[in-house]
Amino acid sequence: MSKAFAVIGDPIDHSLSPNIHSAAFREMDLDCSYIAYRIPKDELKDGIEGLKKIQIRGFNVTIPHKVEMMKYVDKLDESCSLIGAVNTVENKDGVLKGYNTDMDGFLEPFKKKDIPIKDSKVLLLGAGGAARAIVAGFAKEKASNITIANRTLQKAEELSEFSKKIGLNAIPMKIEDVGDSAQNYDIIVNATSIGLKNEDSPISFDSLKENTVVYDIVYMPMNTDFIKKAKEKGAKIIFGYEMLLGQAVRAFEIWHDMEAPYNAMKKALLGGV
Ligand code: ATR
């Protein structure tokens, strides 16, 4: 029997995941299908029952269900308990296991490009759900320290506490206080939603050192103002689509127990951006 996979969320019609995974199935000659399935915010429980009935093999979880999904899985991978949200589920004979691929997806481009994180000084913009997974990633890879700059200072302070608890020294600040301090960092990451609507970069790159790594998790548009200004200064760029691809690769490997066809998935993704 053909194996079924899905992504659930609301809204879901613009998801790129069906394209990426379908391309991987074709490339690997797998008898599988992947659909986008809209489940409204208060219908998660029934939606999951429905997916179990059709013996779904696995599914991705996106806004607004990532945190609530924690309640409905039977087992939790370590990645979920650390981050407090589930974005990938594996169904083994009715037993649901939750994973969070945000951290691995974020780290994947560093590995692919051989960019070291150990002992680096990091500036992270944003303190939401994605930023939390990114902090966990930098802690795991033993960055030297992280400055967390956010519009709402309190959220930067809370995320700094989490960071210190998992062994990464952190300093909270307001995003407008970053000023012209770009030169002080080896890696700068935008984990806010600034750029999605073509806004200007939230920080100045006037003092940026050449070869600083500048990473934007916004993937649409691909060339945000943040990326463009960093490029002009000779930064090493990591694009948002690279994280998305990293997450899709990780999900594929969880579900299929084989190496993902990276290039076919990349081609499908870039065709859709
Ligand atoms: P995600 O799951 O993508 O991280 P989120 O948890 O809603 O989404 O986090 C969004 C982040 O973008 C937050 O850091 C938010 O700042 P606040 O904590 O102050 O809300 C940041 N953000 C969104 N719009 C912003 C804007 N116009 N200016 C500055 N920061 C913004």
Image (cartoon, rainbow, N blue to C red):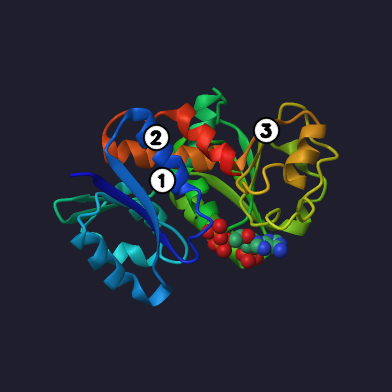
Residue ID for mark 2: 24
Which residue is located at x 81 percent, y 32 percent? Answer: 233
Task: Say which of marks 2 and 1 sits in front.
Answer: 2
Q: Quadrant of residue 256?
A: top left
Label 2 neighbourhood size at 10 Å, few (<14), some (14-19), many (20+)? Answer: many
Mark 1 surroundings within 10 Å by alpha-carbon count, few (fewer than 14), some (14 through 19), many (20 or more) = many
Q: Earlier in the sequence, mark 2 or mark 1?
A: 2
Give the percent coordinates (x, y) of residue 269. Answer: 53, 39
- Mark 1 lies on residue: 101
- Residue at figure coordinates x 70%, y 37% from the top left: 185
**Mark 3 element type:** strand
Q: Residue 30: where, in percent of width, then height?
A: 29, 34
Q: Is residue 148 left or right of residue 135?
A: right
How many angstroms separate mark 3 from mark 2 (CA)? Answer: 26 Å
Check whether the beta carbons of the residues at disc 3 and disc 1 lie within 8 A of each other. Answer: no
Q: Is residue 115 left or right of residue 55?
A: right
Q: Which kind of residue does numbered mark 1 sit on?
A: Thr
What element does badge 1 sit on? loop
What's the amino acid at mark 3?
Answer: Ile
Q: Quadrant of residue 95?
A: bottom left
Q: CA distance from mark 2 to mark 1?
A: 18 Å
In the picture, the disc for residue 237 is: 3
Q: Count neighbours of disc 3 (C-alpha within 10 A) and say few if under 14, some if 14 to 19, many if 20 or more.
A: some
The type of residue carrying mark 2 is Ala
